[in-house]
């Protein structure tokens, strides 16, 4: 029997905020970012990062432009402590980067945390305790007052040790998280946060960070936004606070919750690369930053070589970026389907030609893949779902083969059948081989041996030798150009009458083994048409070969 969920579950109670303002706002600037890869991300790994992996990750985060990086929970393990000490002792932290450390409200842990920070230039000490009804009841078995007591005590223990750090030149910023905030009654979250503020006494000049985590997503993102707006409007001394968001992704809406939370008044965002973190992960900070970017807002983070970052992520965490991960996944800028390929191809061609609107507006591509260091060649890939547009795009982008539209219509279905039979994706080189086999290498029954044409006053005389089914033929003809003369010579040699009905030629790029390609369409008896193609270092010979390729395909 299917269980009745309403008996077992209930919707998280919403906040009463009928005059909410966030739905009418838009994002106009990027938030302050804080990476929590080395702490929240790391603590979610089956095998946590070792010191050298953490160092590699730290350097990569700095390179991306993170100015605040939570480097760990130094009191939690020797590795975490040693990592902090190496960062500080080896002076690996750039001037403009602030490291952040997490600690619970326990004296021994706070003491060890302070030791791990001695000698640092600027640090954020991040205190947290859990505040939701379930945590209060199940984990702590404490009343609200007692939970506030834990927070107040932790805040005091930290405050008492500030002079030790400050006297040795360390600037300290304080951060408090009522952990499980989104599952906590907003009134209680306010009360406990204000209790910590009372101890730390932040001012507009010396703000503290109030981090309001969606530790476990329990509601729709609009509810989180209401909670954030409610806190921003009701907490005292809002101007002495940096309101920070820290979302997870249990319901798959970490990004949405963060974006709505920013509309609701938050200043700062914590998250991880590609959303690594407990359970379904932390907020994917790459996605929110690149979402800002695609709105025309400079995120202040550099993801212009996203593939290298994903490689680093894999090396250091052992995690992989799923192929559909926004912005970073292998397939997110790829179109296999014919109609999508066609639209993308046209959109990119419009941009290349400098036509269309100034801003990016290419169908199916929300962002220019090259802004992430992604290549156009991965945009269109060919399998059995693909159409002529994708085939043509790959031949053109990889080999400079610019098939005429009508030839695309002829070759597209042939390629599609071949790919369908293979039952897998094909590379550009394989498509080129298919094209060569079908058109360029069609030397039976006709194969060119020699061709020469001279023109006087617009009249061309051609002399050619060619094999037909192994038999040598001498062909002479006359026309208003070399191709016309050659066509005439073939007809005079007994080939059923045909005419050239379309023609295009162009130089070829390196890698194709020839310098010119000609495409030529003929119309033969009964109006039957076929395209042919020829390649040669000599452009005239390429077109003559194209005539024979078309004839061979027509079956003449
Ligand atoms: O998810 C969470 O609540 C946390 C806190 C420690 C901020 O990671
Ligand atoms: Zn977290």
Image (cartoon, rainbow, N blue to C red):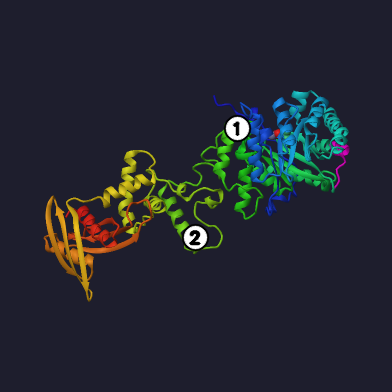
* Residue at 15% from the left image edge and 61% from the top image edge: 490
Q: Position of residue 111 (x, y in %)?
A: 82, 28
Please name whichever residue, 18 or 401, is drawn nearer the observer in this view of the structure.
Answer: 401
Q: Residue furthest front?
A: 90
Magenta span main SS: helix
Q: Which residues are magenta?
A: 194-203
Circle 1 SS class? helix
Magenta span includes 202: yes
Q: Residue furthest bottom?
A: 457
Q: Position of residue 24 (x, y in %)?
A: 69, 53
The disc placed on residue 317 is: 1
Q: Which residue is mark 2?
A: 351
The N terminus, quarter of image: top right
Alpha carbon distance from label 2 to label 1: 39 Å
Please name whichever residue, 121 or 353, is drawn nearer the observer in this view of the structure.
Answer: 121
Q: Residues within 10 Å of mark 1 (few under 14, many from 20)?
A: many
Task: Using the image, determine if residue 242 lies above or below residue 142.
Answer: below
Quarter residue 108 falls in: top right
């Amino acid at each position: 029997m299917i269980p009745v969920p309403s008996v077992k579950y209930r919707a998280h109670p919403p906040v009463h905020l009928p005059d909410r303002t966030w739905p009418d706002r838009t994002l106009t600037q990027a938030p302050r970012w804080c990476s929590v890869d080395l702490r929240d991300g790391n603590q979610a790994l089956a095998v946590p990062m070792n010191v050298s992996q953490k160092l590699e990750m730290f350097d990569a985060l700095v390179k991306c432009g993170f100015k605040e990086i939570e480097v760990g929970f130094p009191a939690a393990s020797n590795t975490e402590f040693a990592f902090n000490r190496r960062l500080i002792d080896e002076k690996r932290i750039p001037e403009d980067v602030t490291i952040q450390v997490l600690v619970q409200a326990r004296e021994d842990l706070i003491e060890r945390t302070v030791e791990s920070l001695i000698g640092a230039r600027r640090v954020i000490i991040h205190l947290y305790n859990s505040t939701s009804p379930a945590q209060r009841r199940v984990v702590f078995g404490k009343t609200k007052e007692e939970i506030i007591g834990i927070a107040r005590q932790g805040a005091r223990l930290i405050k008492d040790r500030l002079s030790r750090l400050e006297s040795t030149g360390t600037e300290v910023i304080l951060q408090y998280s009522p952990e499980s905030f989104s599952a906590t009654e907003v009134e209680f979250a306010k009360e406990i946060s204000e209790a910590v503020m009372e101890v730390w006494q932040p001012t507009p000049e010396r703000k503290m960070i109030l981090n309001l985590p969606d530790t476990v997503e329990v509601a729709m993102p609009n509810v989180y936004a209401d909670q954030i707006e409610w806190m921003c409007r009701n907490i005292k001394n809002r101007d002495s606070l940096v309101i920070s968001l820290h979302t997870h992704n249990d319901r798959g809406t970490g990004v949405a919750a963060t974006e709505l939370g920013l509309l609701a008044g938050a200043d700062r965002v914590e998250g991880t690369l590609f959303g690594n973190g407990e359970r379904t992960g932390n907020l994917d900070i790459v996605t929110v930053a690149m979402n800002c970017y695609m709105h025309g807002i400079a995120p202040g983070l550099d993801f212009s070589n996203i593939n290298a970052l994903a490689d680093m992520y894999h090396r250091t965490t052992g995690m992989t970026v799923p192929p559909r991960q926004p912005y970073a996944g292998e397939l997110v800028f790829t179109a296999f389907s014919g109609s999508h390929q066609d639209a993308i191809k046209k959109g990119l061609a419009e941009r290349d030609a400098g036509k269309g609107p100034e801003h990016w507006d290419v169908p199916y591509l929300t962002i220019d893949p090259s802004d992430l260091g992604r290549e156009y060649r991965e945009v269109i890939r060919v399998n059995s779902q693909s159409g002529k547009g994708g085939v043509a795009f790959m031949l053109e982008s990889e080999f400079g083969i610019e098939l005429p539209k009508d030839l695309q219509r002829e070759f597209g279905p042939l390629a599609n059948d071949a790919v369908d039979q293979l039952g897998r994706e094909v590379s550009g080189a394989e498509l080129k081989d298919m094209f060569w086999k079908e058109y360029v290498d069609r030397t039976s029954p006709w194969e060119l041996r020699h061709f020469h044409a001279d023109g006087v006053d617009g009249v061309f005389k051609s002399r050619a030798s060619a094999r037909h089914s192994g038999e040598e033929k001498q062909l002479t003809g006359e026309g208003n150009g070399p191709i016309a003369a050659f066509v005439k010579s073939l007809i005079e040699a007994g080939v059923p009458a045909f005419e050239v009905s379309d023609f295009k030629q162009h130089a070829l790029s390196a890698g194709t083994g020839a310098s010119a390609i000609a495409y030529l369409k003929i119309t033969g008896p009964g109006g039957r048409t076929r395209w042919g193609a020829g390649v040669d270092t000599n452009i005239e010979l390429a077109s003559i070969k194209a005539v024979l390729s078309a004839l061979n395909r027509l079956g003449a």
